[in-house]
Amino acid sequence: MKRVLSGMRPTGPLHLGHLHGVLNNWLRLQEEYQCFYFVADWHALTTEYENPKRIPAFARELLLEWLAVGLDPEKSVLFVQSAIKEHAELYLLFAMFTPVSWLERNPTYKDMIKELKQKDLATYGFLGYPVLQAADILIYKAEKVPVGVDQLPHLELTREIARRFNYLYGREVFPLPEPLLSEVPKVPGIDGRKMSKSFGNAIFLNDDEETVRQKIQSMVTDVQRPRKSDPGDPENRCVAFQLIKLYFSPDEQAEIVAACKAAKLGCVPCKKRLAEKVVAALRPLWERRQELENRPSLFEEIVTRGNERARDFARQTLAEAKEALFGASWY
Ligand code: TRP
């Protein structure tokens, strides 16, 4: 089986955007590949170094939600980056031969510095972010890396680092990993902008039922349709309809569109139907999460076991890399 690796930074709770944009894809992949999914807590530290005490709780939160959505620790290796010190050692070795110019011209780097200008990101660690990411990927010799388009420059750098290592030390230790871009449905936040924790418009996976219902009821609908008796244009003017597209069958959608256009379906009952669907889809997640929260030792065991499986693999690759580099076994 080919290997897949991906990671998420623990910087906050997960919402519907993560579920539809990332996690559903990870779930599909675990049926076809040997998947390694990890919590990139050291990567979180590159931007959160002023508030690092929040990171462990967010890391736990990610793992709980991954298990709640159905990532299966028997199939996939679920682990925490900082528990596998080998990532740091490979990162250090890569740092020795990675030209600074490769890092400075990285477009993601330049964008992030601009976007997060309230934080001082002119650090050594932040510049080296993609070198650490390359170590994450290459230490598992991953062939495929599911990521969003914003991460493509990092993957390109990972390939350049792998190529340079193999060339310098004369052995094909590392494969050149490829991105796996999946179609990402657009998930609107309740205000119509992209769903995001920082916009305050997100429906979180661990919101309770009442909160989910309230948030959906407050979603923007067709503003040019103040009364039910006005015909609506859901496909072009309604934010709630973008979410409806993710939760209703094509037949149901057609029925809703027709009723809205004919001014027969009001926005309040329509969003109530939507809330019903979203709640029904989230309920199994809430239940699985509750089960895990009731059994903290089981959760600990799952994480410990995932870390061990990752470490076994990482150790072997690191030994191989050092053998290629130094040619001496006591390194
Ligand atoms: N940089 C990624 C992000 O912000 C997280 C990440 C760290 C990652 N290491 C990785 C993703 C390795 C894929 C593979 O989303």
Image (spheres, grey):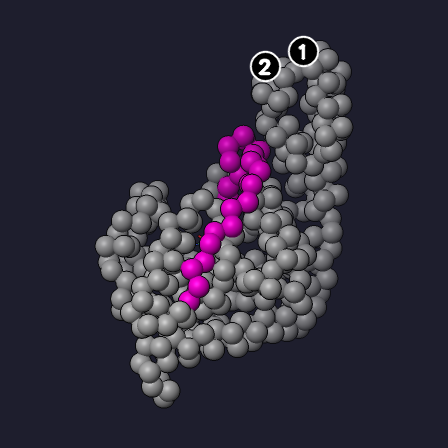
Query: Label 1: how many residues lie within 10 Å, few (<14), some (14-19) or many (20+)?
Result: some
In the rendered image, residue 234, in percent from the top left (x then y), is placed at 64, 21
Left or right, residue 25 beside residue 315: right
> Which quadrant of the rendered structure holds the N terminus?
bottom right
Q: Which quadrant of the structure image shows residue 306? A: bottom right
Left or right, residue 87 beside residue 236: left
- Identify residue for label 1: 230
Q: Amino acid at mark 2?
A: Gln
107 up-or-down from 54: above or below:
above
Q: Earlier in the sequence, mark 1 or mark 2?
A: 2
**Residue at the image point whose x is 58% and y is 20% from the top:** 236
- Classify the position of ligand 1 by quadrant: top left, top right, bottom left or bottom right: bottom left
Q: Nearer the viewer, residue 226 or 139?
A: 139
**Residue at the image point whose x is 55% and y is 63% from the top:** 3
Q: Is residue 305 visible?
A: yes
Query: Label 2: how many residues lie within 10 Å, few (<14), some (14-19) or many (20+)?
Result: few
